Image: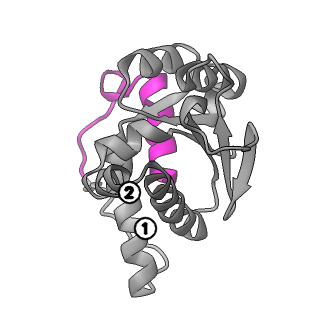
């Protein structure tokens, strides 16, 4: 199953210490810094990435949809918030979507539609790890699976719920 990462752009920028510094200088430089870090992430992980921004702060003469460095960029229409666009995309892609936002309303809606949510802070850590891997030239850093062989019986009592198992699989792909 292909993973489609849908990012609440300004939410991620303003939650990040590094990206918010660029955003305070100029809103366009904040967007460009985010897209650069996402392009670095996309070179390592080949997931489809869409960033959604509010259209009220869109650059002049910009289109509703754009593509830059392999990242899909969407601006909401005039009078519409990016939240509505993200909700619409979560409803469209359902289980294939991973929504990156710290907005509880969007996260709750997306999870009711079957999408998985990740907070902006957690995703920023994964972006930092990807940039580190690219700088060091490491293909994939193997994480400890945490599995220790034992003879203790496991039954349905120990099994995660279906929703949690799907979330775990998606997060492992990141």
Q: Position of residue 128 (x, y in %)?
A: 35, 64
Name the colouring of the figure: one colour
Q: SS of the residue at dot 2?
A: helix
Q: Vertically, is 136 above or below 9?
A: below
Count neighbours of disc 2 (C-alpha within 10 A) and say few if under 14, some if 14 to 19, many if 20 or more: some
The residue indicated by pointer 2 is: 126
Please provide percent x and percent y for residue 33: 46, 61
Left or right side of 66 for 79: left
- Residue 103 within the segment the image draws in magenta: no
Q: Which residue is mark 1?
A: 130
Q: Nearer the viewer, residue 94 or 16?
A: 16
Q: Residue furthest bottom?
A: 137
**Camera-nearest residue between 23 and 2:** 23
Point 64% across, 25% down: residue: 94
The magenta-colored residue range is 150-174
User: What secondary structure is the magenta-colored segment mainly?
Assistant: helix
Magenta stretch contains residue 152: yes
């Amino acid at each position: 199953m292909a993973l489609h990462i849908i990012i609440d752009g300004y939410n991620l920028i303003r939650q990040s210490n590094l990206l918010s510094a660029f955003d305070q200088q100029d809103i366009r430089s904040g967007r460009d810094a985010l897209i650069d870090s996402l392009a670095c992430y996309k070179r390592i992980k080949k997931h489809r990435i869409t960033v959604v921004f509010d259209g009220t702060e869109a650059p002049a003469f910009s289109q509703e949809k754009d593509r830059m460095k392999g990242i899909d960029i969407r601006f909401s229409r005039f009078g519409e918030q990016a939240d509505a666009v993200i909700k619409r995309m979560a409803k469209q892609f359902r289980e294939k979507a991973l929504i990156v936002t710290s907005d509880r309303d969007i996260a709750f809606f997306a999870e009711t539609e079957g999408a998985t949510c990740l907070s902006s802070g957690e995703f920023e850590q994964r972006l930092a790890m990807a940039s580190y891997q690219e700088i060091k030239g490491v293909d994939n850093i193997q994480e400890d699976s945490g599995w220790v062989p034992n003879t203790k019986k496991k039954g349905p009592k120990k099994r995660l719920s279906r929703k949690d198992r799907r979330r775990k699989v998606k997060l492992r792909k990141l």
